[in-house]
Amino acid sequence: MNVPRHNFAYAVVNGLLYVIRGFSSFGDSLLSTEVYNPKTNQWSLMDCPYRPVWRGFAFSFKSKLFVVSNESRFIDIYDPKTETWKELDSGQSLSVYSYTVIRNKVYFFDRKMPGLGVFDPEENSWSSVSVPRSPGGYWFRLGEWNNKVILIARLGGCKALTGDLDKDDASKWRATHIKPSGSNATVVLINF
């Protein structure tokens, strides 16, 4: 990277890794994006909209980069084809602590809302899905497993739950055989 940073948002779009904003090693808010091209093993700096953030997140959808800033109601959308940014007003302040993208929707936990938030970028629609109460009071992480949402409990040793939220029985959650042993789970999806 050209500029060391932490607490940044990141996503892969069309084979390029975008690292968005974050903080410098001195704690200063960074208002730039870095793009890594694995084919050339090169990083390049890129401007992005001025929006100081704390732990935002990013995702790829239809070859575009979506950047969500915590404690902001705006989503910045970058189109690599036209090299332009546009702004989408979500109509609500977001405070997301875990998210996953499955098929054409973004599922997320927000500190300010009960249940599981759902954002459909195609329709620019927002909804929510109820989730069962977890051991320990709240669910800790979201992920993807077999093209379904997986919920990991905050307390280790509890079975994870999974749900296919595009089906008619979207509110049905099923226990999986996955039982994380620790209390600080991280979910990673690796495509080969």
Image (cartoon, grey):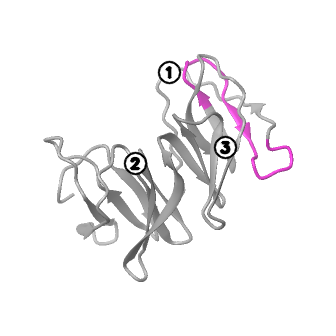
Mark earlier in primary sequence (3, 2): 2
Between label 3 and label 2, give the one nearer the viewer: 2
Mark earlier in primary sequence (3, 1): 3
Q: CA distance from mark 3 to mark 2?
A: 20 Å
Q: CA distance from mark 3 to mark 1?
A: 20 Å
Apparent side of residue 29 relative to residue 121 in the rendered image (left or right): left
Asked if residue 191 lies in the magenta stretch, the reply is no
10 over 136 or under it: above or below: below
Q: Tell me the tag on residue 126.
A: none
Front-most of 87 and 30? 87
Tag 2 secondary structure: loop
Q: Which residue is pictured at 34% across the width and 71% down the height? A: 39
Location of the N terminus (image quadrant): bottom left
- The residue identified by callout 3 is 149
- The residue identified by callout 1 is 182
Tag 1 secondary structure: loop
Q: Which residue is pictured at 41% across the width and 83% down the height? A: 82
Which amino acid lies under the numbered mark 2 shown in the image of this protein? Gly
- The residue identified by callout 2 is 56
Front-most of 150 and 129? 129
Q: Which residue is pictured at 28% across the width and 49% down the height? A: 22
Q: CA distance from mark 1 to mark 2?
A: 25 Å
Stretch in magenta: 152-170
Asked if residue 155 lies in the magenta stretch, the reply is yes
